[in-house]
Image: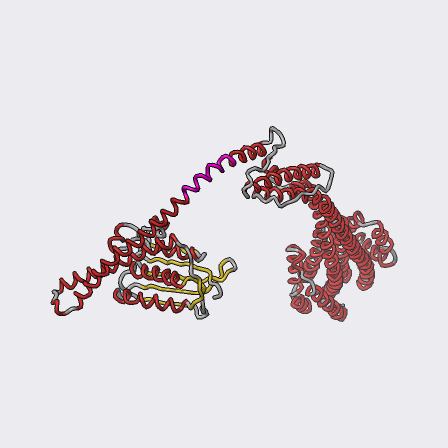
Amino acid sequence: MSFIDNLKVRNKLALMLILPLAGLLYFSASGTWEKYREGGEMGKLRLLASLAVRISALVHELQKERGLTAGYMHSRGVRFSAEVEAQRTETDREMEELKESIEGVDIVIFGTKFTAAIDGALSALGTIRKRRGSADSLKVPEEEIFDYYSGMIGSFLDTIFVISTLSTNSEASIMTFGYVNLLKAKERTAMERGFMNGVFAAGRFAPGEFNRFSSFVAEDGAYTDVFLSVAPEGQRSFYIEKMRGRFVEESEKMEKAAFERANESFGVDPAYWWEMMTGKIELLKEVGDRISHDIDEMADRFRSAAQLEFIFYIAVTASMAAAAAMLSYIIAPSIIRPMSEMAAVSRKLSTGDLDVSVEARSRDEVGALANAFKEMLSYLKGMADTMDAIKKGDLHVKVTPVSEKDVLGNAFKDMAEALREREGRLRSLLKVTDMDLVRTSRYKADFLARISHEMKTPLTHVIGFSELLATQEKMRLSEAGRKYVDNIYRSGKDILELINRLLEFTRRGADSTVDMKEFDPREVIEEVIAGGRPAAAEKKQTIHVNVDRDLKSLTADRAMFGQMLSNLMDNAVKYTPPGGTVELKVWQDIYNGEKVLRVRVRDTGIGIKPELKGKIFDIFEVGDGTSTREYGGMGIGLALTKRFVEFHGGKIWAESEVGKGSTFEFFIPAGRA
């Protein structure tokens, strides 16, 4: 349970609410999604119902065209020619209306089964003109044309059957299933009409035709029974009421005659049969239209109910979430705010800040904790006042512990007594120390004066005479002698420079006074570059200088600034091999909201080993022995530069890679620059 123990109080309160709230949100979201899905499904069902009406209308016309075509072919073109042409016009009109309805709907949303079924039916419909031509020519068997129409009609009815399987609503599925069975019963009636139209025209059954007629009647009855078994009471009553009267009764009489006189002449007029069966089929169509209307109304009703329940679920979920948030907003701050305030006070106390206060706003456990904090804070402020008095020199302040167990109070009391005892001893020691410091300072000044005179004077003579020897033709020095004299001259100059740096470092260490004046830093930069170019030219080095054009003035110690640049440039030239590059860049920048002057010196020299980078700014550190022997130096320049930068309140650092070069960069406050 350490995880929970480490949580903030706010998070613990949130954790108490989040699990029940998450459960509530889950079930609310699940119900909301279910109603949203159901509403979408009912919307799809309405679209499918409208498509089913159009499909049913086309099937109705195809059924009539099939029957008339069968009569036309059975009579070898003698009868029904005009009727066939008129019916084909009606069929074409329904075909175009169905295609327009399909084009206005994205049928992909109904799934692959529906798409495959409608594509198959439309594919068969696409060959209808070719089939009509074959029927007109009377060159194909009548059964082939009849089966073509029946197969195509069956494909469209299968499409409507797929519709009944798409809904997860049981009532919608059952009603659609009953509708499909009614349409299939109507199809068997239409097939019977067309088939028997030819049989009655011939006057008797040909071999095998009676069995086919019997199957039509049996299948019609079976589909009708299924429809009546699943249809709601209203639809069942409507069907029973509609399917009575002259058309139904006369059709049944002629069917009975066909069964009873199967082996003899029927005595049935084909035109009368067609008229009565067509009337019966129209009645079935009225029943089908009523059911499709009921399906549309049911889908609309379910969709409206689902939308209302969807809104209700959202409203309930939002209300409960808002109520939980409101309670959290009201209750949580009364616990969290005082504890947060006391935590903030504790953090300030841990840093020594006693300028804080705590208010108890309640009488509960949190309020009791706040009162305890107030008492502790008052005690600590009293101890702080005592310490402040001791810090100001009042060692006779009275320290009174709260009790014997007051560890802090007793410690303060003992400390005050110890400080009073040591005060007396320190006063006597300070008198002696002051005299020693004065004496030491005087010795240091004398030492500096003596070493300056004793070492610089003879070195000046050595340098002067060696220069004279090298320039006087009358001395007639050999080439080797001239080289020796040049070595003496350069060595003397190097020793003099080292002495000057050592004296400067010692003097600046003793006196850190900085002569702050405003000057043009570009003048100093030019002087430093001019002084360093001869040495760089001797080694055939390239010096690049990049100075910010907006750099107008700098408030600093001019001499120190020049020495900083000179030390860094001298080092860069010294440690860069012949043909190398030294780059000086000076620009203005902002550091911690303050305007500063930045200087960067980059070279392509030998670089600094990683283990030596931390020591290069220490006095007398010049890298390893190899570089010291090759390049010379006492390790004073960088230490002096670091001290000058810090005198100005700046910062210096270095980056280097062995064999690739070094970059030294520093910044100092720019003053009014």
| Magenta stretch contains residue 222 | no
In this picture, is 468 found above or below 182?
below
Question: Does the segment drawn in magenta span residue 428?
Answer: yes
Q: Is residue 405 left or right of residue 27?
A: left
In the image, residue 88 lies at what x, y percent?
73, 68
Q: Please state, as top left, top right, bottom left or bottom right, where the N terminus lies in the image.
A: top right
- Of residues 447 and 490, the one nearer the viewer is 447
Residue 155 visible: yes
With 292 as the anchor, is 376 left or right in this view? left
- Its colouring scheme is secondary structure
- For residue 89, what is the image quadrant? bottom right
Please provide the residue range marked out in magenta.
Answer: 420-433
User: Is 179 placed left or right of 632 in the picture?
Assistant: right
Q: Position of residue 3 (x, y in %)?
A: 59, 38
Quarter residue 369 falls in? top right
Residue for point 70% across, 65% down: 104
Q: Is residue 380 left or right of residue 311?
A: left
Residue 617 x %, y %: 36, 52
Q: Nearer the viewer, residue 217 or 610?
A: 610
Q: In the picture shown, does residue 309 fall above or below 578?
A: above
Vertical arrangement, residue 625 with respect to residue 403, above or below: below
Q: Position of residue 584 (x, y in %)?
A: 37, 64
Residue 18: tell me if it is visible: no
Out of 149 and 646, give the one closest to the viewer: 646
Count of residue discs: 0
As drawn, the residue found furthest toward the top would be: 404
Report the predominant secondary structure element of the magenta stretch: helix
Which of these two is toward me, 23 or 252? 23
